Image (spheres, rainbow, N blue to C red):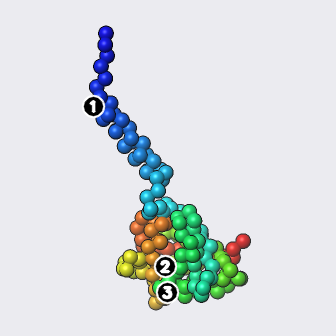
Amino acid sequence: MKTSVNFPRVVLAAIAAVIVVVGAMFYYGLIPTGQSYRPANSIMVLAPYRYNGTWVFDDPAVGLVREPFVGGAPEMIDELVAGVPDAEAGFRLTFSATEFPGYQKKLVWLRGGQQGNWYRLEGTEQECWLCPALFKYYRQAPKKFYVRADPKE
């Protein structure tokens, strides 16, 4: 008895299998999308430092090197690190979209604009602009940020 292969069914099954595998790889972050980010419920840590007169940070995990803080953020950082020894050589900046024990300052979302988002330091009139690098960490701009500065150990 001769068995015939139904090529259209085989091709269709192969395409379906590829779609399932690629979908699973995308879901688990195994395929780079150019918009990699970390989960929004995480507490994250960066190590900003002074470079050419402004605060910058590196995060090779999301492809950022000497990413500058601009638009009011350097002044807020200056205030945040006032009691941190040798902060200009680097300090630990802990931040989260959710409240965490020991946070020092809270930033509240004001508005989007110029491909970034504006935040106000709670209890003040100080505002800062967070650039599109924010989306390396969050899918959407958080309505609040909680931050803390500590010496780099």
Task: Kindly identify the amino acid type of the residue bearing the numbered disc 3.
Answer: Gly
Where residue 138 sits in the image (x, y, percent)?
45, 66
Which mark sits nearer the N-terminus, 2 or 1?
1
Q: What is the distance, in whole Å, between disc 2 and disc 3 at their CAs?
A: 12 Å
Element class at badge 2: strand
Residue 126 drawn above or below residue 139:
below
Nearest to the eye among marks 1 and 3: give it.
1
Give the residue at mark 3. 72
Foreground of the two, 78 or 51: 51
**With 76 as the anchor, is 35 left or right in this view?**
left
Element class at badge 3: loop
The residue depicted at 49 percent of the width and 74 percent of the height is: 145
Where residue 133 sits in the image (x, y, percent)?
47, 72
Q: What is the distance, in whole Å, between disc 1 and disc 3 at their CAs?
A: 61 Å
**Residue 8 — which label?**
1
**With 55 as the anchor, is 143 left or right in this view?**
left
Foreground of the two, 98 or 9: 9
**With 7 as the anchor, is 72 left or right in this view?**
right
Task: Kindly identify the amino acid type of the residue bearing the numbered disc 2.
Answer: Leu
Give the residue at mark 2. 107
Task: Kindly identify the amino acid type of the residue bearing the numbered disc 1.
Answer: Pro
The residue depicted at 57 percent of the width and 65 percent of the height is: 60
